[in-house]
Image (cartoon, coloured by chain):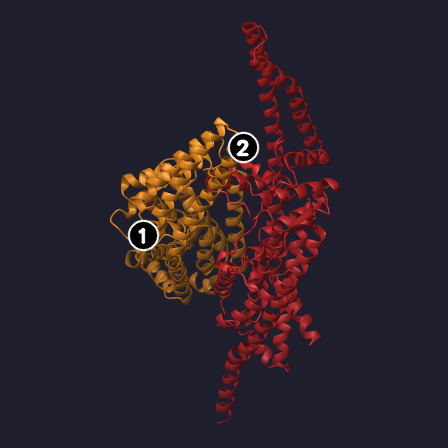
Chain colours: A red, B orange
């Protein structure tokens, strides 16, 4: 069996098409990194330009106000309330200019500690921990930022300051902050678009880029592509024109073992492919912009209290819902385990389906559609597709929005393993009934004829 | 040549793959329609929740103001309280109109609410809708009142033109076109893999003609798919949903802040989708003749479309990049590119790519 397995693996790896597909995928990922890097650089440059423009506008305003003050002084002999207020305001302006200049300098030199302090001041400057209404005083275009988001941001900035962590590239104002968005924000219209564009984070370091890609459903997409490349090893040998299976069936090979060998050789290849395509973006980031911090804070929701009146009345509570942060390395460790299990599950699903459908394109369409519909359905503990969005499972977003605390990393692993076993068993039955069944009949009939 | 095209078209249209593609498409559209029908009650519930939330905020502020005024007179707070009382009364009126499903009253009262909210904000009150958003909503409501149309929920509507718009925004996108190309775009590569092409090249037909025959037949099947999308999306709400005489006059706001009606929107959507499908099929024909392998062809097509989408969305949105037009709904409503330039770029690129495919195929062996 080992020999047959290594033979199958060699067959896969000696196939030019496999290598071209793998190289193309690697090139695509490198391209993706380059695109992301360019956007991140544009955002950084944009931040600096914005801050410089703001500084110039502020200096111009100061000059205009000085002229105004002189004019008013001349008109009103320096006694009026207006003049005094203007003088007081002008006295504070040099401090504002220094703050802006310092922000530009810190941002250009990557002095993140200072930037974090500035961000933290933006939040904690207004906050009184004993009075929650303070949390309501943050707006974006007259629409409130959720108090939950403010709480999360405050803690994130504290974490980043304490551990001296380099942030992602994001729209950052000297007077505002690089906001962390949460599910509690309910913006509408243009404000929603603005919030989305200002809270997009672009990671250029190895670990950061992987983290960003996991959020963008990169892993399920890579798995589906992997299935399309490596999941057809029985179906391609059982097409109308290629009858490779006949060759195996006349060999002294147990057909059950043959299925296992085909299944596991494909599985090994797809696992290798997925891990390679996870490694490539990491290496891209690592060689170009470094590793990134292992302690980068990953936000985790801890759920919300369900309503005592019933599920219809469940509402998130922005003032009381708990949350915490975990280190990026812990998050990536969990993501890695879930990636492996998810790969095996989706591969088993694809493998079983292609034995029935026999057409890779149709199988790919069905698997993609079922996965999409599965993700879109109300998440439940026993729906394996609930765990396809690895990021939302690990950060508790799925569980919180569904008011279902049983959607966890561990339950995900158990559910996915259970369905993998089930699908593999169904796959084996299909193989026995459809593939071997047909061949069996064919051979029996032929033998009978020849005997007759 | 016409006979050959017809033969290839028949060959394709009779395959299980095309039947599967059409069946899945129809199933998706029916699924969405059924979802929308089931969720009709949710629309009213969402509206009530939204305005109740605003009302709750205003009432909370009013209570605080009353408490402050009981301790000490303050003219500013008094003004805010008066405005707040007016606003909360109007919000209550709006909630009643929503519950009674009196859409004309609802539209008019919503306009009044936003007007009062503007005064309330000027008196330092808090109302969680930005000025720009209020302006847009008032403008839309006024336009709907002028046209005599009820306000619809874009996401859950079963009104003919808006359901069609919803389908355009779901199926005529990167995902939808990739779905089409995954099913149809690999047909040529399969001919190379299966060795059929050797047989075809022994026939008395030039390779250029063969490229055109293949291109036209795939394009024709793609148009059949497009036709199915539009017809099913039209028929379902027409037969089982809300269809009224002025359905296609429903106003949609574009990026410039102007109204276009759904009739104009649908006309543009049809033309854009026909042009983009033509471009997409040309790309897949080029890749298939170039690569001659199903897996690699699909990977290349997938990479090109996703890459094109990311570049035009994240880096630069140039009118000269045909991939900028792959999300038809966005192109019509939010893109700043002109309609004629979009069409010219798509058709121009398709012609160029087709000529390139013919040239490549002419010089290559089997």
Q: Mark 2 Cα within 10 Å, few/some/many (few <14, many 20+)?
A: few
Which residue is nearer to you in this view: B11 or A164?
A164
Q: Is residue B262 left or right of residue B279?
A: left
Evaluate whether residue B55 shows in this view. Answer: yes
Residue placed under numbered mark 1 in the picture: B160
Residue positioned 50% across, 87% down in the render: A446
User: Which of labels 2 and 1 is toward the front?
Assistant: 2
Residue A131 spot, x, y in % from top left: 62, 40
**Letter of the chain that mark 1 sits on in the rendering:** B
Furthest residue toward front: B71
**Letter of the chain that mark 2 sits on in the rendering:** B
Which residue is nearer to you in this view: A323 or B222?
A323
Q: How far apart are the alpha carbons under marks 2 and 1? A: 58 Å
Q: Mark 1 Cα within 10 Å, few/some/many (few <14, many 20+)?
A: many
- Quarter of the image with the N terminus of chain B in it: bottom left
Which residue is nearer to you in this view: B363 or A298?
A298
Q: Is residue B341 left or right of residue A2?
A: left
Mark number, residue B71? 2
Secondary structure, mark 1, is: helix
């Amino acid at each position: 069996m080992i020999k047959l397995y290594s033979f199958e693996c060699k067959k896969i790896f000696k196939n030019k098409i496999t290598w071209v597909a793998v190289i193309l995928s690697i090139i695509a990922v490198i391209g993706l990194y380059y695109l992301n890097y360019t956007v991140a650089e544009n955002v950084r440059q944009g931040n600096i330009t914005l801050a410089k423009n703001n500084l110039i506008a502020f200096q111009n305003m100061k000059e205009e106000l000085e002229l105004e003050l002189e004019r008013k002084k001349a008109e009103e002999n320096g006694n009026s309330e207006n003049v005094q207020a203007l003088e007081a305001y002008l006295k504070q302006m040099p401090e504002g200019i220094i703050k802006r200049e310092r922000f530009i300098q810190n941002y250009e030199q990557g002095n993140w500690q200072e930037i974090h302090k500035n961000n933290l001041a933006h939040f904690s400057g207004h906050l009184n921990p004993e009075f929650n209404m303070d949390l309501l005083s943050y707006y974006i275009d007259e629409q409130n930022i959720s108090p939950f988001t403010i709480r999360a941001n405050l803690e994130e900035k504290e974490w980043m300051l304490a551990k001296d962590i380099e942030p992602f590239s994001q729209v950052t104002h000297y007077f505002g902050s690089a906001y962390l968005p949460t599910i509690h924000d309910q913006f509408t219209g243009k404000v929603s678009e603005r919030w989305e564009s200002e809270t997009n984070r672009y990671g250029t370091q190895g670990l950061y880029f992987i983290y960003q890609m996991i959020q963008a459903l990169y892993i399920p997409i890579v798995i589906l592509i992997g299935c399309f490349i490596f999941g057809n090893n029985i179906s391609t040998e059982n097409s109308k024109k290629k009858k490779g299976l006949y060759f195996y069936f006349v060999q002294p090979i147990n057909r059950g073992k043959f299925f296992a060998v085909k299944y596991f050789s494909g599985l090994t290849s797809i696992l290798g492919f997925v891990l390679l395509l996870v490694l490539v973006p990491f290496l891209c980031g690592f060689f170009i912009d470094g590793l990134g911090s292992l302690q980068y804070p990953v936000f985790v929701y801890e759920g919300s209290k369900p309503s005592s009146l019933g599920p219809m009345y469940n509402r998130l509570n922005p003032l009381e819902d708990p949350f915490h942060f975990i280190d990026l390395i812990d998050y990536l460790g969990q993501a890695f385990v879930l990636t492996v299990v998810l790969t095996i599950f989706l591969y088993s699903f694809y493998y079983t389906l292609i034995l029935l459908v026999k057409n890779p394109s149709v199988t790919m369409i069905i698997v993609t559609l079922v996965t999409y519909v599965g993700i879109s359905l109300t998440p439940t503990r026993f729906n394996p597709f609930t765990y396809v969005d690895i990021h939302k499972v690990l950060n508790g977003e799925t569980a919180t929005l569904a008011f279902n605390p049983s959607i966890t990393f561990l339950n995900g692993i158990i559910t996915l393993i259970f369905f993998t076993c089930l699908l593999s068993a169904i796959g084996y039955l299909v193989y026995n009934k459809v593939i071997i069944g047909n061949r069996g009949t064919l051979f029996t009939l032929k033998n009978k004829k020849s005997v007759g | 040549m016409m006979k050959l095209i017809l033969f290839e078209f028949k060959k394709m249209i009779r395959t299980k793959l095309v039947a599967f593609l059409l069946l899945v498409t129809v199933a998706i559209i029916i699924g969405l329609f059924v979802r929308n029908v089931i969720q009709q009650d949710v629309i009213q519930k969402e509206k009530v929740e939204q305005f109740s939330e605003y009302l709750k905020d205003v009432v909370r502020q009013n209570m605080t103001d009353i408490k402050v005024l009981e301790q000490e007179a303050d003219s500013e707070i008094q003004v805010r309280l008066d405005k707040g009382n007016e606003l909360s009364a109007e919000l209550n009126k709006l909630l009643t109109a929503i519950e009674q499903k009196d859409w004309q009253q609802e539209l008019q009262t919503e306009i009044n609410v936003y007007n009062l909210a503007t005064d309330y904000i000027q008196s330092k009150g808090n109302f969680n809708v930005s000025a720009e958003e209020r302006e847009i909503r008032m403008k839309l409501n006024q336009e709907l009142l002028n046209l005599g149309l009820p306000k619809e929920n874009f996401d859950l509507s079963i009104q003919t033109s808006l359901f069609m718009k919803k389908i355009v925004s779901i199926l005529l996108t990167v995902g939808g076109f990739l779905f089409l190309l995954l099913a149809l775009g690999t047909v040529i590569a399969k001919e190379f893999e299966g060795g059929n092409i050797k047989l075809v090249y022994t026939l008395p037909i030039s390779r250029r003609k063969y490229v055109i025959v293949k291109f036209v037949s795939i394009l024709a099947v793609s148009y059949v798919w497009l036709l199915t999308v539009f017809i099913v999306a039209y028929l379902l709400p027409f037969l089982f949903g809300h269809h009224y005489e002025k359905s296609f006059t429903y106003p949609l706001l574009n990026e410039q802040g102007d109204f276009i009606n759904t009739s104009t929107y649908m006309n543009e959507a049809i033309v854009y989708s026909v042009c983009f499908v033509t471009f997409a099929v040309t790309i897949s024909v080029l890749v298939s003749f170039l690569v001659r392998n199903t897996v690699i062809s699909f990977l290349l097509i997938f990479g090109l479309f996703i890459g094109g989408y990311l570049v035009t969305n994240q880096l630069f949105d140039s009118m000269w990049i045909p991939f900028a037009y792959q999300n038809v709904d966005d192109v019509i409503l939010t893109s700043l590119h002109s309609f004629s330039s979009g069409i010219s770029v798509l058709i121009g690129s398709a012609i160029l790519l087709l000529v390139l495919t013919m040239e490549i195929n002419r010089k290559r062996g089997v």
